[in-house]
Amino acid sequence: MCRRAVKRLAANDPSGRHICYRAYVSGQGWQKPVCDGTIAGTSGRNRPIKALNIAVHGVGGSAANAFRHTAEPVDGRGKWQPSWTAVTGDGRNFTIGSAKRNAPNMLGFAMNVGTGEICNTVRLRGHDWGGRVCSKPRPDFTFGGTLEQRGLAGGREAHGVSVRQSRRRTPPDRHVHREGGEFRQRGLLRSGP
């Protein structure tokens, strides 16, 4: 699990910020954990991500929520899980989405950290990797993925994800600000912990 992977990194770099994650990929199952910006998921194999298992170190814990495909879309959009995860402390696992057999595919995710900065890039089916998106500590959060769904045949599920903790402030391609930027203004993203 990711907890073990992040603890190994922390043992070698106790003052560093780290994130480890693994994807549950449709038709494949749970992948091995990867860390600090390494790609999880698949590319070009038409296998969407259904869940992410995450553990962090050196960031004052993290919380997240999955945006998933729904059989009953509102305005062509997916649906958030009912609530964010609780803030989970450093060195502990948490999961968003679901690894159950008939669980919906993830279209995207929102995530925050207690200190530092978190960045992600996401690849959607039929698209190249998106730009890097970063956020500052809670109450800010980063969003990766899409809010749109086009049905199963032409969907835009998340197929790959790369997440990293930033040791120093670097200019991202885009920031999701305290109020969630466009997502908050459109009322599409609920505030997290």
Image (cartoon, rainbow, N blue to C red):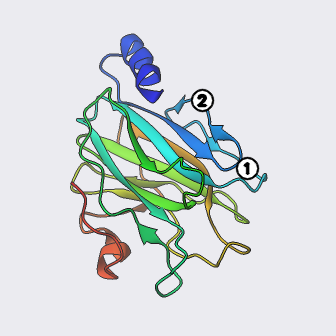
Please state the horizontal and vertical placement of residue 10, each as a whole percent of the image.
Answer: 37, 18
Under circle 2, the secondary element is loop
> With respect to residue 184, does 35 lie above or below?
above
Residue 180 in the figure: left or right of residue 174: left
Q: Nearer the viewer, residue 32 or 34?
A: 32
Identified at 40% across, 53% down, the residue is: 134
The amino acid type, in three-letter code, at marker 1 is: Ser
Is 119 in front, or is 32?
A: 32
| x and y, in percent, of residue 97 in the image | 46, 53
Residue 166 in the image: above or below residue 110? above
Q: Quadrant of residue 12?
A: top left
Q: Residue furthest bottom?
A: 75
Nearer to us in this view, 154 or 124: 154
Q: From the image, tell me which residue sits under label 2.
A: 32
Residue at 58% over, 43% down: 24
Q: Which residue is mark 1?
A: 43
In the image, taking residue 108 as reference, residue 128 lies left or right, namely right
Residue extending furthest toward the front: 101
Question: Residue 44, image x and y in percent?
Answer: 78, 53
